[in-house]
């Protein structure tokens, strides 16, 4: 479960051509440009106790060091920030904070600190597009344009949310934002403004792709998905019919002509990322006992989906994958990883995965 679907080897030509997915991508790309311009022109305030506000206020953003030294210094001090803010990391496991920083009070948010290497020279050119926050799992299926600032209420959906936070990348992006304002001889804006205009805005990309995956899962389960429910003062396009069409065509294809799990992931409809593998790839961090629990939790929905597809396909094409998943689940159970702080709805997913594997003879 932790070793699968992380490598770029799965980037292959797609099997399916889904016209509604192409329309969906184009319309969202156009609308996100308008949405970003709208957000840039407005003032937003996050509460002082928002976890990202507290994080940035705790860091000395020095311009005396060059960017390379600055990023390395942030890397070195990140463990202290993780402990202060109770962020789960390869060094520490913390139970989720039940205060909503990104979605709403019906969701339990798990924030996982990562420190992946990134190309600073390339990031200098594209700092506005960096994604220091990425969501791996959330319960929503609508593809609305709602900034993730703790008030995301598009439906009655509830459940676990897993978000990866790259502190060095976030603080690099923040310093670049400050530098741009100083270069333009503008007063430095509020931390809230930076967070909403860039990292939280860019977080909506992975959020939207996970929402698309959840919609595909609902089609497989024959469950209705949420309607478009944007909560911003900007006229945006309702793309629900294109999202639903793409999901239905995809599910019909994988049931009609069984394909391997890796090909399912390669061909999964997306909105922003080129391939779904880029959405569900785990960060390159040490898989210590402290962090394994949340990494497994972040991926349970993916494996639940794949096993449910297998149950419908009634094909032997995924024998190797099923065997690997079964072995990994057995290992995680032996190590008590599945009992280490997991919550009720996660336990339900584990039970369903075990049942599906048993039904398949594993």
Image (cartoon, helix red, strand yellow):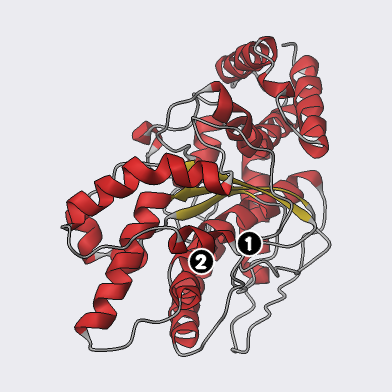
Q: Residue at x 25, y 77 (%)?
A: 180
Few, some or many C-alpha atoms within 10 Å of disc 1 (few <14, some 14-19, many ≥20)?
many
Disc sitting over residue 35 in the figure: none
Image x and y of residue 146, in percent: 62, 73
Image x and y of residue 8, in percent: 36, 36
Disc 1 element: loop
Image x and y of residue 198, in percent: 43, 70
4 relative position to 66: left or right: right
Q: Is residue 1 above or below residue 63?
A: above
Disc sitting over residue 200 in the figure: 2
Q: Residue at x 67, y 11 (%)?
A: 330
Of residues 130 and 192, which is closer to you in this image?
Answer: 192
Q: CA distance from mark 1 to mark 2?
A: 9 Å
Q: Kindly indicate the quadrant of the structure image that contains residue 361.
A: top right
144 relative position to 27: left or right: right
4 relative position to 9: left or right: right
Q: Is residue 320 above or below residue 303?
A: above
Instruction: Note whether residue 257 is visible.
Output: no
Q: Quadrant of the C terminus?
A: top right
Residue labelled with disc 1: 102
Disc 2 element: helix
Q: Kindly indicate the quadrant of the structure image that contains residue 75.
A: top left
Q: Residue at x 47, y 39 (%)?
A: 281
Q: Residue at x 74, y 19 (%)?
A: 357
Of residues 269 and 327, which is closer to you in this image?
Answer: 327
Q: Is residue 249 above or below residue 26?
A: above
| Residues at circles 1 and 2 in contact by the CB criterion of under 8 Å | yes
Instruction: Note whether residue 98 is visible.
Output: yes
Q: Is residue 97 above or below residue 32?
A: above
Image x and y of residue 309, in percent: 69, 34
Of residues 100 and 124, which is closer to you in this image?
Answer: 100
């Amino acid at each position: 479960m932790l070793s699968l679907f992380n490598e770029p080897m799965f980037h292959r030509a797609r099997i399916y051509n889904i016209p509604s997915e192409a329309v969906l991508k184009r319309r969202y790309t156009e609308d996100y440009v308008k949405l970003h311009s709208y957000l840039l022109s407005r003032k937003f305030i996050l509460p002082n106790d928002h976890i990202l506000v507290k994080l940035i206020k705790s860091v000395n953003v020095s311009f005396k060091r060059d960017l390379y030294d600055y990023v390395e210094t942030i890397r070195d001090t990140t463990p202290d920030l993780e402990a202060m803010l109770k962020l789960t990391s390869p060094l520490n496991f913390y139970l989720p904070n039940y205060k909503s920083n990104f979605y709403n009070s019906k969701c339990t948010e798990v924030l996982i600190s990562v420190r992946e290497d990134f190309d600073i020279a390339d990031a200098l050119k594209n700092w506005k597009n960096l994604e220091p926050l990425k969501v791996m799992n959330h319960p929503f299926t609508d593809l609305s344009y709602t900034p993730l600032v703790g008030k995301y209420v598009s439906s009655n959906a509830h459940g676990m949310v897993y978000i990866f936070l790259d502190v060095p990348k976030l603080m690099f992006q923040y310093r670049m934002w400050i530098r741009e304002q100083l270069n333009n001889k503008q007063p430095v804006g509020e931390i809230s403004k930076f967070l909403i205009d860039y990292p939280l805005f860019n977080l909506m990309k992975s959020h939207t792709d996970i929402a698309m995956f959840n919609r595909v899962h609902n089609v497989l389960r024959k469950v209705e998905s949420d309607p478009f429910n944007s909560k911003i003062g900007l006229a945006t396009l309702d793309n629900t019919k294109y999202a639903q069409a793409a999901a239905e065509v995809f599910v019909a294809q994988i049931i009609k002509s069984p394909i391997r799990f890796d090909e399912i992931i390669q061909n999964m409809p997306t909105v922003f990322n080129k391939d779904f593998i880029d959405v569900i790839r785990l960060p390159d961090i040490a898989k210590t006992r402290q962090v394994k629990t949340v990494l497994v939790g972040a991926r349970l929905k993916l494996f639940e989906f794949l096993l449910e597809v297998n149950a419908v396909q009634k094909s032997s094409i995924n024998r190797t994958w099923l065997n690997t998943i079964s072995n990994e689940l057995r290992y995680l159970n032996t190590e008590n990883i599945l009992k280490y702080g997991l919550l009720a709805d996660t336990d339900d997913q584990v039970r369903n995965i075990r049942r599906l594997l048993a039904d398949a003879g594993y």
